[in-house]
Image (cartoon, rainbow, N blue to C red):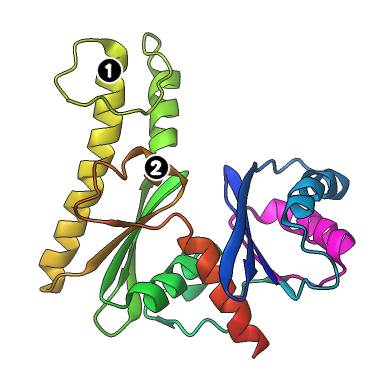
Amino acid sequence: MNICIDVGNSTIGIGAFKDNKLIERMVVTTDPRFTEDEFYQLFKKPFAVIDSGKENLDNIIFSSVVPQVNVSLLGALKKLTKVEPLLIGPGTKTGLSIRVDNPLEIGNDLIADLVAAKEKYGYPCLIADLGTASKILLLDKTGTFVSCLIMPGLTLSAESLSSKAALLPEVSLIAPKSIMVKNTLGAMNAGIVYGHADMITGLIKRYESELGYPCKHILTGGGAVYVKDIMKDDFIYDQNLNLDGLNIIINKNNK
């Protein structure tokens, strides 16, 4: 069994894979203030639910975009499992071709997205990963990662609007059925959610216009749940893309 962990700015995704099939998935909140002991207590319950057991747990891999939690998290995982986790970094085998100015700038989470998309869906491919930040990743027709766009995510946009505009309330990010809204909450929800969906769609079209050929469109990330129904005609929604990518990477590194 492989345990795959994705540490994001807002949440930590945990997936258990048996025979390369995801059999359990859960999400806990990211808190960079947590100590090793607090991470140990936090992970005890998920690992008990997964019921991995030391005798049949083969590998642990995690990607992280929150460096300040890595040491504490690694220590907690070692205490829980006695397995040495693999943190994606330079030298990790991914099978991914990269052509950008500085490959070391690429987040581990994006590497996992790209690896999974390439293997599951082929290429050319455009991946919209909507999290704390929303990203669009391009695998060109040769299967090479050549470009990425980064912008504020849905939740970040909503929080910024509410905190900076004194008269605007917090919102649910549940899109109304129509943009013909007649109240403040509806106006904010419609503007943020439909606006984000149309921004992603517009950027995808701009990419394809410059490329000169169409691509497959993949939608993933925690924020994708708010727009997946709006974008369902143009995108394949894959909730587990990142965890699948981590599982593929750990298998490549253990061959």
Q: Which quadrant of the figure has residue 247?
A: bottom right
- Counting from the top left corner in percent of width and height, residue 135 is at 37, 55
Q: What's under tag 2, amino acid-wise?
A: Val
Residue 251 at x, y = what percent? 61, 81
Q: Earlier in the sequence, mark 2 or mark 1?
A: 1
Highlighted magenta segment, given as a residue range: 60-85
**Whole-number angstrom distance, CA of label 2 to CA of label 1:** 18 Å
Corner quadrant of residue 167: top left
Q: Secondary structure at mark 2?
A: helix
Query: Residue 67 colored magenta?
Result: yes
What numbered label is drawn on residue 225?
2
- Nearest the viewer among 53 and 241 is 53
Look at label 1 and name its amino acid.
Answer: Gly
Q: Residues within 10 Å of mark 1 (few under 14, many from 20)?
A: many
Which residue position is annotated with label 1? 186
Residue situated in front as seen by the camera: 81 or 114? 81
For residue 31, the mark is none
Left or right position of 89 against 124 = right
Total numbered labels: 2
Determine if residue 100 is in view.
no
Residue 58 appears in the figure: yes
> Which is closer to the viewer, label 2 or label 1?
2
In the depicted structure, whether residue 103 falls above or below residue 64? below
- From this view, report whether residue 182 is shown above or below residue 120: above
Q: Residue at x 44, y 51 (%)?
A: 221
Q: Secondary structure at mark 1?
A: helix
